[in-house]
Each structure stands twice: as structure tokens, then as C-alpha cells.
Amino acid sequence: MSESSDTLIEVPESVRAESFVEVKYDDSIPNNVDLSSDKQLQRALESWHPGYLDWWQDMGPDGFQDAEVYLRTAVGVDPKGWAKFGYVKMPQYRWGILLAPQVEGRTIPCGKHKGEPAWQEVPGEYRSLLKRLIVVQGDTEPASVEQQRFLGKTAPSLYDMRNLFQVNVEEGRHLWAMVYLLVKYFGRDGREEAQALLERRSGQQDNPRILGAFNERTPDWLSFFMFTCFTDRDGKMQLAALAESGFDPLSRSCRFMLTEEAHHLFVGETGVGRTIEATCAAMNKAGITDPYDVERIRALGVVDLPLLQRKANFHMSVTRDLFGAEISSNAADAFNSGLKGRFNEAQLSGDDHQLQDATYAVTRVVDGRLVDEAVPALRAINCRLLDDYIADCQGGIDRWNKVIEKAGIDFRLTQPHKGFNRRIGEFSKTRISPTGEILSEAQWEARKGEWLPNERDSAFIQSLMKPCTEPGRYASWIAPPRMGINGQPGEYEYVKIA
Ligand code: BYC
């Protein structure tokens, strides 16, 4: 699979960039927003820049700031030819501000202002809700870089190391995208929020990142691949919903971010897929047919499939919490005001995009049972996005199962029940098994090690995390990719370690 396999990630038609807009690289901050014509904004961003670089040095990839990395950099916003590739030291990456082109005559696609011209300035009555959405989106970007900062040291190949760093620099750019909006449109408190984005820290007790999953650790490469597959997919869904925003600058920012996001999902999905491939090949070579013959499989230096299922269970459930409570008045307000749509909003047919009288089926816990209840659709916006997300995840899981099936091994990876291991929303006070049974606390405690990574799993994964930095070589637990990045050969030196 080449990097062009990014296209296996569907980006909704309505949010794709349409035409090429040249990025100005002569400015100190690359941009396609004619930054030099707004001196005050330019100065504000230039004064934020050194703090960003300090943050990158402190919290970005540990130990690789001087390495030459074969990275792509955005040079335009045409989906067909938007990036160029070349060796870059990460602190010298040209982080910039890129908006997808303005769509002439665009209107607000949903809520009570549906059909009115999209806002080019912040609508005063929704200022604080809009700012909150931008801050939450912005906060996740540096958080993920912080979570992944030690992984370079245990990369299973130079190819994977390069992909990690590519994801990291682009998350940095996504932070820039949100900071641009805060600084340009929200005056002094926007600048303060931009500063606070550099100050919160993933996992830090007294100043943590805003959302739960972004304070979890990403301690190993399997976690990284699961994170980029499942948590970046939340990014895709949320960005797609924000790309439908009636606030046009947010919509245009998110539309371009989605172009970059596709590669992150590709890294995750193929990373897990290659792990499965290595496991199946090693099992077949050793004549092991039982996927639960764990000790023998682990002795081959590969990851057993039941452990991959537990890892996936953890990442899926923690990521589902990122959609917020299934029934949420915040989400109703965001939709009703036209600030955030549903997935693919402008393309959805079959309702009025206002949802005043519509209902949506939400699974709830009622008297100790799981019941589907018709809830006012406006209040169930988060639930609907979560359901769309779960459906979107299934494509990747099906592709993994094809690898297992092709190898002739009797095992299937599945998605756990929506209520499994949740801390936010309808199921947060109920213990639910992956197959959807309601459990007592004692039953949960007795069995959770079967469903979520346990201490032995973590110790085993850590034992596999040995760096493999010879060009063209891969750690035992992961198969090489089918094709290199940008058509480069497998043995290409993707990172020149200083
Ligand atoms: N952890 O009504 P509720 C990405 C808070 S990922 C902690 O349930 P609402 C990426 C919530 O903030 C995508 N707190 O939910 C991926 C609220 O607090 P306030 C990121 C949580 O507001 C990989 C209160 O609980 N983008 O891009 O409808 C790498 C009640 O909230 C959590 C976005 O999320 C949680 N899990 O929805 C890099 C889009 N959940 O405000 C990047 C923007 C809820 O009352 N954000 N709370 O103090 C949003 O649309 C919404 O803020 C949320 C929450 C969907 C997150």
C-alpha cells in the first residue's frame, strides 16, 4: 500500500477542497490567508510562535529534534497535489495556516439559521459556545504529540518512525489552524486561550488536557497504531461535523485538516494490519493453529490476536467517550445554532436539517436493562455522531479480519458493545461486557482482564518495543508495508538519525 492509499479513508464530498490555492512560503508563517495584509494578526501570531517552538522542543518527539526526516509539507490545498516531500529537521518544519477555498454563496446547513449566508465573522450570540468548540478541538492536537513523544526511541522501523513524526508535525499544524481562528476572531480572550493551549499538558494532574482520552498514556507502538486508527477517527468525525459549521472560517480550516487526517488513519489501520500479518505468518510458519495458544505465539516474538482485541477494546471504548454524553444539551445548542453539523450534514437527505420534531433512538439503561428509547433528535446529536463513528470503524476491522481469514486462522476481531468500559454518558454508571450484558461490579472486576489489556499484556508488549533503525529492516512483530512513502523503496532511509 502506498501513501496514496490514504484514499481508503472517505472524506465527505461536501467538505473536500475544490481548487488549488497557492501557499505563501515567503512569509515567516506560511499561509494562504493573505496574512501580510493584516499586520496586527501577523504580529499576534508571530508573538505566539516562539512559545510554540519552545513547546515543540519540550514536548515534541524526544531525542529526534536534529534528525532529518522525510516529511510531506503542504504547499496548497488541492486534494490532488497539495504536498511536497523532502528531508526536514522537525523544529524547522514550516507550520502554517491553510484554509480550504471559500465556497461562493455557502449557506448555514443546519439549525435555526439554516439557509442564511454562512458567517464570515463570529456571531455575537454564540461567541462563547463557538470559542469552546475551537478550544476543545485545538487542545487535542498538542495533547496527542505529548502522548506520543517517547515513541521514536522504540520505533519498529525507520518507515514507522517517519510516519510517527509526520503525524506529530501535522498535529502541530492543526494546533496552528485553531490558534489562527482564536487569535483572528476572538481578540484578547482568544489570545489567552491560544496561550493556554501551550500550557496544559497531557496527563498532568494540575493542568491536564481537556478531554479524557488525551490524558491517557500512549506507552507503546500498538497503542500508537490503535490511537491513530480509532482516536484520530474521532478527529475525522468531529472535524467533518465542524466542517459543516455555519462559521465559515472554522468550516474551511476543518476541511483542509481532513485532508491531512486521512494519512493518520492510514498509519493506524495499516499499522495494526501489518501487526496482524506478522502474527498470522509466524503462527502458520510454526504450525500453530489455535489463536489462544498464547505462550507459544508470544515466544515467536509476535502479538497474539486476543491481545490485539483487548487493545482495540480499550482504545475504542476510551475514544467513544470523546463524543460526549449521548444526550446533550450542549450538542443540541451547537447544532441548533448552526455551529456544528452532523457527519455529512449538507449531503444528508430525508430530514429538514433542523430536527425540531424529529426523534432518534438512543440506547439507555432503564431499570437495569438496555432499552432503545426515542429521544428528541436535537438532544441526541452526540449519539448520532457516535453511531456514525462506530459504523466508520467497522470498515477497518473488516479489512483486518480479511488478513486473518486469508491466513486460515479461526479468529475474528469485533467491536465491543457501545456501553463497554464507558466513563461518559448513558453507560458511565453501568458495567457492561463486550457482548452487551449488564454486570455487577464483582463480575466486572473478575473478568475485566479478559477484555482490557492486563499487566502481563503490557509487560509483554514492552518486551517487544526494541528499536529497529536499520533502513529496510522491521521488528519481528510487524510486517513491512507493501509500498514505501511517496513511491520510495522499502529500504529508503526515511529518518537520518543525528
Ligand atoms: N472527557 O454535553 P457533554 C481529534 C465535558 S479528536 C472530559 O457530555 P458536549 C484528534 C464537556 O466538555 C476530536 N470531559 O458533551 C484525534 C462538557 O464540559 P463543559 C476533538 C468531557 O459538550 C487524535 C461536559 O463534559 N474535537 O481531533 O456535547 C489526535 C458536558 O458535555 C468529555 C472535538 O471534540 C470527555 N471525554 O460534547 C489529534 C470537537 N466529554 O464544556 C486530534 C469539539 C464531554 O460543560 N468538541 N466532556 O465544561 C465538541 O464538539 C464537544 O466539546 C465534545 C463534548 C463532543 C467533546
Image: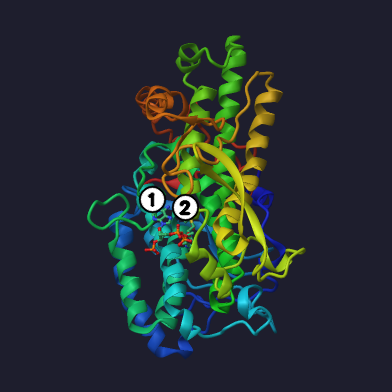
| First in sequence: mark 2 vs mark 1 | 1
Q: Give the vertical position of 103 relative to 406 (above or below).
A: below
Q: Residues within 10 Å of mark 1 (few under 14, many from 20)?
A: some
Marks 2 and 1 close (CB-CB < 8 Å): yes
Q: On the picture, is 175 further left or further right than 159?
A: left
Q: Is residue 283 left or right of residue 214?
A: right
Q: Nearer the viewer, residue 362 or 90?
A: 362
Instruction: Name the residue at 40% across, 63% down.
Output: 92
Q: CA distance from mark 2 to mark 1?
A: 7 Å
Q: Position of residue 136 (x, y in %)?
A: 42, 63
Outermost residue toward the right in this view: 350
Let me know if residue 60 appears in the view.
Answer: yes
Residue at horizontal 50%, vertical 54%?
323
Percent x, y of residue 258: 59, 61
Identity of the residue drawn at 66% across and 78% down: 114
**Residue to which mark 2 is pinned:** 322
Relative image position of residue 476 (x, y in whole percent): 49, 25
Q: Secondary structure at mark 1?
A: helix
What amino acid is at disc 1? Answer: Gly
> Which is more toward the observer, 468 or 96?
96
> Is the CB of mark 2 within 8 Å of ligand 1?
yes
Q: Give, as a three-letter code, the residue at label 2.
A: Leu
User: Where's the N terminus, which quadrant?
Assistant: top right
Whether ligand 1 has any atom under 8 Å from the Cβ at mark 1 is answered as yes
Number of numbered discs: 2
Residue 318 horizontal/vertical position (percent): 45, 44
| Mark 2: secondary structure | helix
406 to 297, vertically: above or below: below
Ligand 1 found in image quarter: bottom left
Quarter of the image where one finds residue 346: bottom right
Residue of label 1: 212
